[in-house]
Image: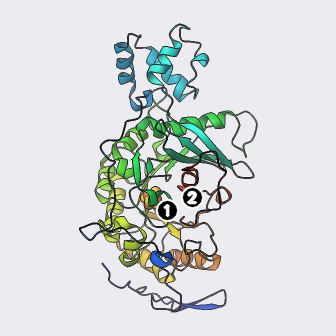
């Protein structure tokens, strides 16, 4: 998703206590509202010999690479590969059109290619990457969660969502994740490997194929061609830990067709739990993507437990890097904040977050609180509605633009990592009860 000094109270706030749903809530950290910790249900953060949480920033060296695919290359490189294989270079453009504009890898569909070489050409540049293993739909059919199996059997997910006027795809950037966030099913099994550029793009192309086939519900049904408008890198994995392949994928998303998908960079959101050096690198790319910082706590005391990467880069460092991103790109930054009951949803935390953002200037940031899936009986459950609204109002009172987001796909285990975790042992089984880890 993404100093043990006591949090400061809201400087200058006239607010002293708030009556929520009949309960009196004080804004101070010592107030009567409980402070639930990630360790409450027995979760233990694995620690390294250096006394810091164990995190995995890179995949192991011996990982077998996915097969080379045209989406891993730019157009000139595709032409070179075809020439080396004895084909005509211009065939690369035709193959690219089939992939990025017609969303097909089936040689029988490629009637503009000579019948004798169609299969060889497709084999050379379009090896199968992701095979659909499972698909879950909401009742209205406007949200679809896909489970894909990669060439080596690892499982990854993407979620396709229709909103009024736009279609968004949440993509995975890694198989597994090395960031070990305690609320996240993906993080509990560590990083298996980075996805290749083409494996990231294939999630988009296959989603476009599903949309073109009319399988995403909620459309007008008038035959207007549709495709994915927005991409969010909020599926499995920490995108900035797979920096080069994610950046290549973003380039290929915005490259004009048929070299790429011809999407707008502004519709692409790259998120991180706070890998500060990589945020600075991203700010220097000439790519106007939207940047999202998954903060989830404004105080280091809680964030050290909730987002273990906070042991490397503290809240203030992550926020400074986010502000730097805005300074360099002029693009407003999003702060993602999963609201977890009695863990990070206290009013004083909303005040502290607002103060920290305002210390860094005005107009550069937007906060998106998102309720966690309701999981009664677990510490990993969503905040009460009144608490959520109070949290939002406190941010707004201090001038921070804030939008309470809806969680899509609750009924299909919409949160990252759950579908793959449920299918790890037997890919044919139906999905069990929601995993309380996220
Ligand atoms: S995928 Fe899970 S473990 Fe990895 S950064 Fe996101 S929330 Fe944390």
Q: Can residue 1 be seen in this view?
A: no
Q: Quadrant of residue 370?
A: bottom right
Estimate the spatial distance between the alpha carbons at disc 2 and disc 1, rounded to whole Å: 8 Å
Which residue is rendered at x = 42% and y = 39% of the image? Answer: 249
Outermost residue toward the front?
425
Disc 2 + disc 1, Cβ < 8 Å: yes
Up the image or down, 139 lies above or below 381; here it is above
Mark closest to the chain's N terminus, 2 or 1: 1
Which residue is rendered at x = 55% and y = 27% of the image? Answer: 101
Question: In this orientation, which residue lies closer to the viewer: 151 or 332?
Answer: 151
> Which disc is residue 30 wearing?
none
Q: Quadrant of residue 29?
A: bottom left
Which residue is rendered at x = 48% and y = 35% of the image? Answer: 151
x, y percent for residue 411: 68, 58
Q: Is residue 341 visible?
A: yes
In the picture, the quarter occupied by the C terminus is bottom right
Question: In this orientation, which residue lies closer to the viewer: 55 or 385?
Answer: 55
Q: Give the quarter the ligand 1 occupies.
A: bottom left
Pointer 1 residue Cβ closer than 8 Å to ligand 1: yes
x, y percent for residue 365: 44, 64
SS category of the residue bearing label 1: loop
Pointer 2 residue Cβ closer than 8 Å to ligand 1: no
Q: In this view, does 223 lie to the left or right of 58?
A: right
x, y percent for residue 100: 52, 29
x, y percent for residue 259: 45, 27
Residue corresponding to mark 2: 415
Graded by Cα atoms within 10 Å as few (under 14), some (14 to 19) or many (20 or more), the crowding at tag 1 reads many
Residue corresponding to mark 1: 184
């Amino acid at each position: 998703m993404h100093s043990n000094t006591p949090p400061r109270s809201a400087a200058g706030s006239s607010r002293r206590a708030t009556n929520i749903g009949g309960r009196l809530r004080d804004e101070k950290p010592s107030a009567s509202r409980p402070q639930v910790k990630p360790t409450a249900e027995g979760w233990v953060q694995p620690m390294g010999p250096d006394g810091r949480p164990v995190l995995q920033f890179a995949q192991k060296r011996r990982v077998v690479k996915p097969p080379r695919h045209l989406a891993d290359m730019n157009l000139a490189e595709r032409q070179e590969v075809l020439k080396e294989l004895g084909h005509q270079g211009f065939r690369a453009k035709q193959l690219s059109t089939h992939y990025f504009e017609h969303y097909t890898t089936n040689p029988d569909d490629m009637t503009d290619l000579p019948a004798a070489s169609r299969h060889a050409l497709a084999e050379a540049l379009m090896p199968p990457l992701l095979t659909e293993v499972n698909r879950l739909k909401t009742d209205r059919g406007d949200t679809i969660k896909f489970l894909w199996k990669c060439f080596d059997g690892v499982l990854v997910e993407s979620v396709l969502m229709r909103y009024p006027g736009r279609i968004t795809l949440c993509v995975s950037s890694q198989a597994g994740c090395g960031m070990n966030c305690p609320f996240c099913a993906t993080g509990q099994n560590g990083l298996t490997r980075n996805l290749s550029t083409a494996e990231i793009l294939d999630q988009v192309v296959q989603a476009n194929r599903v949309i073109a086939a009319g399988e995403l519900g909620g459309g007008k049904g008038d035959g207007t061609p549709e495709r994915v408008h927005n991409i969010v890198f909020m599926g499995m994995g920490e995108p900035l830990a797979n920096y080069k392949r994610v950046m290549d994928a973003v380039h290929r998303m915005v490259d004009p067709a048929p070299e790429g998908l011809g999407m707008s960079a502004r519709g692409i959101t790259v998120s991180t739990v706070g890998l500060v050096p990589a945020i600075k690198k991203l700010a220097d790319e000439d790519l106007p993507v939207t940047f999202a910082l998954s903060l989830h706590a404004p105080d280091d005391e809680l964030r050290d437990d909730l987002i273990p990467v906070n042991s490397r880069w503290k809240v203030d460092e992550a926020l400074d890097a986010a502000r730097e991103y805005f300074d360099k790109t002029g693009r407003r930054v999003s702060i993602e904040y999963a609201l977890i009951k009695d863990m990070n949803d206290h009013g004083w935390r909303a005040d502290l977050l607002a103060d920290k953002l305002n210390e860094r200037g005005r107009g550069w940031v937007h906060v998106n609180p998102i309720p966690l899936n309701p999981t009664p009986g677990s510490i990993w459950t969503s905040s009460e509605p009144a608490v959520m609204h109070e949290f939002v109002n406190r941010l707004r009172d201090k001038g921070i633009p804030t939008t309470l987001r809806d969680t899509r796909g609750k009924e299909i285990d919409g949160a990252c990592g759950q579908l793959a975790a449920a299918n790890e042992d037997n890919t044919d089984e139906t999905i069990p009860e929601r995993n309380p880890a996220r």
